[in-house]
Image (cartoon, rainbow, N blue to C red):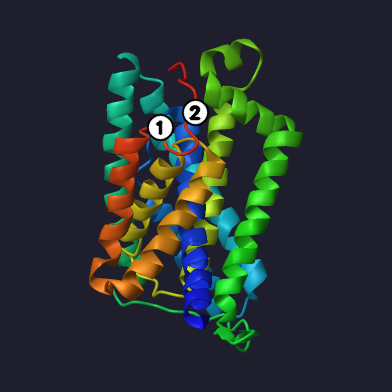
Amino acid sequence: MSIWIDLLIIGVSIGALYGMLALSVSLIYASLDIIHFAQGEIFTLGAFLGWVLFTKGVPMIPTILLASFATALVAIIIQKCIYNPILNMGGGFSIRGLTFVVAGFGMSAILQNAYWLIWGAVSKSYDANFGDPVQLGSVSVQPVYLVVIVVALIVMALLHLMFKKTKIGLAMKAVSYNKPISALMGVNTRFIVSFAFGLAAFLSSVSGILSAQIIFVRYNMSATMLLKAFSAAVIGGLGNVYGAMLGGLIVGVVETFGSHFIGSAYKDVISFVIMILMLMLRPGGLFSTKTKQKA
């Protein structure tokens, strides 16, 4: 029984990391109806900035906050300088969307090479040392896994309050449903898109920093993470924040149990199998959203 509980806790923790990155993918998709393929490099930037701050002696909580705010600022600058001109170009939604996707791949390559030039190709690590293993009955759990779960719960609670109780949260929901009508009703859609990029980057950074407590930090560390986060977002329903986290948890738990009982060699395949099955059985995801009007 103890091995099942241990695997479940690890799976939920890993799934929470996937879920936070999937949240960032869904937030941008909800604002623009477009997948941002450089979001994985934003995740990596947060991990690297966290490493820089933590190795300079900054405590972990300020490290997470400072690195994540800095990452959000970089993402907003990229959005305003690179992506905004693309989104303002003519040619209709399909042309702009395709150009945005290509620009995302290009930005991904640029950022990866920038990280390689700045921090090198050698893997880096930083362990916040959250304390001794926690004893839960007969199960001994590394505290980092519990910290990740707690952070994910806090993130989801804050997002829920934002979307239900704040004007900016309600404006984001309106933009995600119908951007042109939201603009006619007085919503500053440009600000909402920038805010969505910044918030998505903040969440990606938090996920990156916490992931760095489990895996090594490397300039190309996000490749597999982004694919699994995308799978999680699709499983939950693209554009739905609750679905993104649920999808992440499903991928994390199934992957962890599958890796243990089937073999770690198949670990990276599991999430894609789940995604394909979901696309076959429920193409809109578990929390499929209503059709939105393109801007």
In the foreground, 95 or 156: 156
| Mark 2 burial class by Cα count in 10 Å: few <14, some 14-19, many 20+ | some
* Residue 242 percent coordinates (x, y): 56, 43
Q: Residue at x 53, y 31 (%)?
A: 193
Q: Which residue is mark 1?
A: 284
In the displayed structure, 188 sits above or below 150; it is: above
Q: Is residue 138 left or right of residue 45?
A: right
Q: Residue furthest right?
A: 165
User: Does any portion of residue 163 appear in the rendered image?
Assistant: yes
In the displayed structure, 116 sits above or below 94; it is: below
Q: Which residue is mark 2?
A: 289
Q: Give the spatial CA distance, label 2 vs label 1.
A: 7 Å
Q: Is residue 149 left or right of residue 281?
A: right
| Mark 1 burial class by Cα count in 10 Å: few <14, some 14-19, many 20+ | some
Name the mark on residue 273.
none
Q: Residue at x 62, y 81 (%)?
A: 130
Callout 2, which amino acid?
Thr
Q: Earlier in the sequence, mark 2 or mark 1?
A: 1
* Residue 152 percent coordinates (x, y): 60, 58
Query: Which quarter of the figure is the C terminus placed in?
Result: top left
Q: Residue at x 59, y 29 (%)?
A: 191
CB within 8 Å, label 2 to label 1: yes
* Residue 93 percent coordinates (x, y): 35, 18
Local secondary structure at mark 1: loop
